[in-house]
Image (spheres, rainbow, N blue to C red):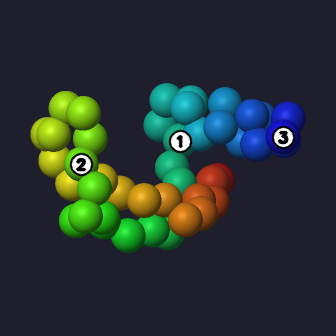
């Protein structure tokens, strides 16, 4: 699990890019109800 934490920290760097695979969920809603929900299946950091 520590490995995932390191990847998330890298993702949060300013200007970092990532390739994301997922789908927009029309059947769920957030508490804020301000837009569609993206269900992320995977992501890959782009160097």
- Ranked by sequence position, the earlier of labels 3 and 1 is 3
Q: Secondary structure at mark 2?
A: loop
| Total marks placed | 3
* Neighbourhood count class around disc 3 (C-alpha, 10 Å): few under 14, some 14–19, many 20 upward: few
Residue located farthest toward the left when viewing the structure as drawn:
34
Q: Secondary structure at mark 1?
A: loop
* Neighbourhood count class around disc 2 (C-alpha, 10 Å): few under 14, some 14–19, many 20 upward: few
Does the residue at mark 3 contact the one at mark 2 (Cβ under 8 Å)?
Answer: no
* Neighbourhood count class around disc 1 (C-alpha, 10 Å): few under 14, some 14–19, many 20 upward: few
Foreground of the two, 3 or 16 = 3
At 75% from the left and 34% from the top, the residue drawn is 5
Residue under circle 2? 29
Residue located farthest toward the right when viewing the structure as drawn:
2
Q: Alpha carbon of mark 2 to alpha carbon of mark 1: how far? A: 28 Å
Q: Nearer the viewer, mark 2 or mark 1?
A: 2
Quadrant (top left, top right, bottom left, bottom right) of the N terminus: top right
Q: Quadrant of residue 6?
A: top right
Q: Alpha carbon of mark 3 to alpha carbon of mark 2: how far? A: 28 Å
Residue under circle 1? 16
Q: Alpha carbon of mark 3 to alpha carbon of mark 1: how far? A: 21 Å
Indicate the position of residue 28 as horizontal and vertical percent values. 28, 56
Foreground of the two, 17 or 27 = 27
Does residue 6 lie above or below 37 as drawn?
above
Residue under circle 3? 1
- Ranked by sequence position, the earlier of labels 2 and 1 is 1
Q: Is residue 20 visible?
A: no
At 49% from the left and 29% from the top, the residue drawn is 14
Indicate the position of residue 47 as horizontal and vertical percent values. 64, 53
At 55% from the left and 32% from the top, the residue drawn is 12
Indicate the position of residue 45 as horizontal and vertical percent values. 63, 54
């Amino acid at each position: 699990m520590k490995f995932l934490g390191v990847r998330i920290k890298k993702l949060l760097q300013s200007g970092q890019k990532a390739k994301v695979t997922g789908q927009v969920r029309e059947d769920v809603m957030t508490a804020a109800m301000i837009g569609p929900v993206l269900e992320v299946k995977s992501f890959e950091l782009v160097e």
